[in-house]
Every structure is written in structure tokens, then in C-alpha cells.
Amino acid sequence: MLLVRLGLAVAFIGSATAAQATTVVIFVEPMTFERYTKVFDTPGRDRVLMCMAPPATSGCTELPVKPHR
């Protein structure tokens, strides 16, 4: 399931236009390992981050994204 969601996130980022950048944040609940995704339009490059869901205080892990142009 994680690979499917990650694949969809990467496909979404790959289809973004050159003028916009997208940050996809995948939040993971530490107790149940449930995941949910938020998408933000941000300046800069496209990024995928995996983070612990709030109120966790640990940092986020940036996942590698290959540009498909």
C-alpha cells in the first residue's frame, strides 16, 4: 500500500508544470501506522517528505524524487 501511495505521489509530482513546485507530505501515525497525505504548492523544487503525524516531534525524512521531463 505504501508503494502505491508513493507511486501516486511521484506520478503527481512528475505531471506538475514547470512553473509550480509541489511538496507532498506523507504523515504516518506512530501507534497505528496509518498514513495520510497532504499536498502543498510551494516555491522551489518538487519534494516528497515522510513525517510522523502531529503531535510527534521527530523530523521528516525526505524521499528521493527523480524528475520525469
Image (cartoon, rainbow, N blue to C red):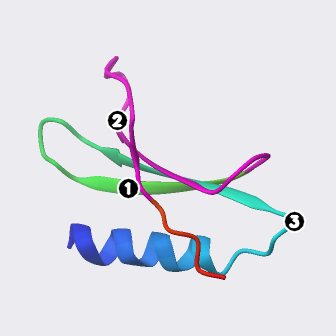
User: Type of residue at label 2?
Assistant: Ala
CB-based contact (under 8 Å), mark 3 and mark 1: no
Q: Which residue is drawn at 59% across and 80% down?
A: 68
- Would you name the residue on which mark 2 appears? 53
Q: How far apart are marks 3 and 1 (CA)?
A: 26 Å
Of labels 3 and 1, earlier in sequence is: 3
Closest to the observer: 64 or 7?
Answer: 64
Residue that appears at 67% across and 58% down? 22
Q: Is disc 3 in contact with disc 2, using a CB cutoff of under 8 Å?
A: no
Q: Where is residue 21 in the image (x, y as percent from the top left)?
A: 74, 58
The part of the chain drawn in magenta is: 42-64
Is 11 left, or right, of 35 in this rendering? Answer: right
Q: Which label lies toward us, 3 or 1?
A: 3
Q: Position of residue 63 (x, y in %)?
A: 39, 51
- Identity of the residue furthest to the top in this view: 57
Kindly indicate the quadrant of the structure image that contains residue 64.
bottom left
Image location (x, y in percent) of residue 69 = 66, 82
- Left or right, 34 with respect to 24, comes to left
**Which three-letter amino acid code belongs to the residue tagged 1?**
Tyr
Q: In the rendered structure, are the residues bearing label 1 and label 2 in contact, judged by CB atoms less than 8 Å apart?
A: yes
Q: Which of marks 1 and 2 is nearer the N terminus?
A: 1
Q: Tell me if residue 49 is in the magenta stretch.
A: yes
Q: Is residue 18 left or right of residue 22?
A: right
As helix, strand or loop, the secondary structure at mark 2 comes to loop
Q: Which residue is drawn at 81% across and 70% down?
A: 18
Asked if the magenta segment contains residue 12, the reply would be no
Determine the secondary structure under disc 3: loop
Q: Name the residue under label 1.
A: 36
User: Mark 3 = which residue?
Assistant: 19
Q: Which of 2 and 31 is in front in this view?
A: 2
Which of the image's four quarters has the N terminus? bottom left
Q: Tell me the SS state at disc 1.
A: strand
